[in-house]
Amino acid sequence: MAKKVLIISSSPRKGGNSDLLCDEFMKGAIETGNEVEKIFLKDKTVHPCTGCSVCSMYGKPCPQKDDAAEIVEKMIAADVIVMATPVYFYTMCGQMKIMIDRCCARYTEITNKEFYFIIAAAEDNKAMMERTIDGFRGFLDCLEGPREKGTVYGIGAWKVGEIKDTPYMQEAYNMGKMV
């Protein structure tokens, strides 16, 4: 049965290494008949959470007028969520963290989803990348019924496009086909 797949690419560079891995994942997921949408966060306006507590204390929608509510709505509607980030100082980039924080108003509605993680890093030590994945897992720990399905560790790629010459492109494609 086809699934609704939402890919959130937080690379600040279109065609950056993590974004290229997203495209490969997307190809695989589309080829197996899934409905896939990729959101490129750089094309969206997502402000940081202000900690106003309107959502948590009063159950009201976030008062900020930006694209976060639309993205969260798509996360709620998706069957599969792919979260992709370049690795900065052994953690996710700020754009992804801001998006995760903005889920606060409706995170209890992001239930029973399958999650895939895609990271790209200049570092070539996979074990060091677990810090980044732990950040994603912290988000999942707050959700109801998440299922972590796989991670693409796109390591050893610093310059734009360097990931193209690695086996991680095929790995991302294959993982997309498994959705």
Image (cartoon, rainbow, N blue to C red):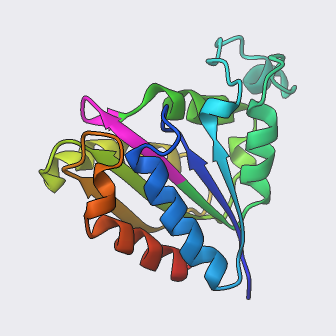
Judge left or right: residue 87 versus residue 111: left
Q: Residue furthest right?
A: 60
Q: Is residue 64 magenta?
A: no
Q: Is residue 143 visible?
A: no
Q: Is residue 85 magenta?
A: yes
Residue 18 x %, y %: 42, 49
Residue 154 vs 28, above or below: the answer is: above
Residue occupying image coordinates x 33% and y 59%:
164
Residue at screen point 65% across, 76% down: 30
Taking 85 as reference, is 51 above or below it?
A: above
Asked whether 84 or 105 is in front, the reply is 84
Q: Is residue 150 above or below residue 82?
A: below
The residue closer to the viewer here, 15 or 61, is: 15
State which quadrant residue 114 falls in: bottom right
Q: Which residues are magenta?
A: 83-91
| In the foreground, 24 or 149 | 24
In the picture, which quadrant includes the C terminus? bottom right
Task: Return the x and y of residue 86 as percentages of the image width and height.
Answer: 38, 40
Q: In the drawing, does residue 61 fall left or right of residue 135?
A: right
At x 63%, y 85%, the residue is 32
Q: Is residue 55 visible?
A: yes
Q: Main secondary structure of the magenta part?
A: strand
